[in-house]
Amino acid sequence: GAVVSQHPSWVICKSGTSVKIECRSLDFQATTMFWYRQFPKQSLMLMATSNEGSKATYEQGVEKDKFLINHASLTLSTLTVTSAHPEDSSFYICSAQAPGNTEAFFGQGTRLTVV
Amino acid sequence: GDSVTQMEGPVTLSEEAFLTINCTYTATGYPSLFWYVQYPGEGLQLLLKATKADDKGSNKGFEATYRKETTSFHLEKGSVQVSDSAVYFCALRNQGGKLIFGQGTELSVKP
């Protein structure tokens, strides 16, 4: 199956700093990528949908200025958590979807800890 | 709005026991239905899917049948193994193309 690589797999940062998470589709072109947040023992919450070359669409309640999403190429999307605070600590997961394909492929996730 | 409801966990079974994880959904139109599995510290992997009513998805001994009349997509396996221990998510893809997840069900299989 298709492979989606997410990097880093875990990161610890200080409050007030910014962290960038990368999501790459390794063997297919992803016109659409999704970013999710998962709290411990809970389901995935969709944060935003990004389409290559256009602005991301954020879900209600997600701060677009805090969670910056860039989808500059067909194989790469990035999520930047700006001015991170401890409450931003979570597991972030991306998924990528090829054109015309109903299946989404998930990255392995990034564990963010803000101290 | 569209939603997915799963049976609450954790579910604890002995090896070789029969597994059922219930999943029901609410959605307009005809969504595609999915089961994903998440192993500790990892992302999600697609386990199986069904795209229309009465379709049966199957993989690695797991099965689920798309039942439109009961809006259900229950996951079953005849004989679980310790390696099946994970969190299982039921999901639907709605008309807008978004994946909507259930809350997840943790499965623990003891030897």
Image (cartoon, coloured by chain):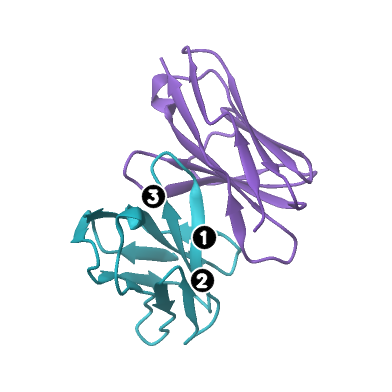
Chain colours: A purple, B cyan
**Which callout, 2 or 3, points to the residue nearer the camera?**
2
Report which residue position mark 1 lands on. B46
Identify the residue shown where x is 51% and y is 55%. B45
Q: Distance between the residues labelled 1 and 3?
A: 15 Å
Q: In the picture, which quadrant includes the C terminus of chain B?
A: bottom left
Is residue A62 visible to us here?
yes
Q: Distance between the residues labelled 2 and 3?
A: 18 Å
Which x, y percent locates residue B105?
Answer: 30, 56
Which x, y percent locates residue B59?
Answer: 48, 70
Report which residue position mark 3 lands on. A43
**Which callout, 1 or 3, points to the residue nearer the camera?**
1
Q: What element carries label 3?
A: loop
Marks 1 & 2, CB-CB < 8 Å contact? yes
Q: Which chain does tag 2 point to?
A: B
Q: Is residue B60 left or right of residue B96?
A: left
Which x, y percent locates residue B18?
Answer: 25, 72
Say which mark, if any, is on residue B49.
2
Q: Is mark 2 on a helix, strand or loop?
A: strand
Q: Which chain does tag 3 point to?
A: A
Q: Is mark 1 on a helix, strand or loop?
A: strand
Q: In the picture, which quadrant includes the N terminus of chain B?
A: bottom left
Q: Which amino acid does label 2 sit on?
A: Lys
Decide which of A54, B18 is in the foreground and name it: B18
- Determine the residue located farthest toward the front in the rendered image: B111
Q: In this view, does B93 lie to the left or right of B87?
A: right
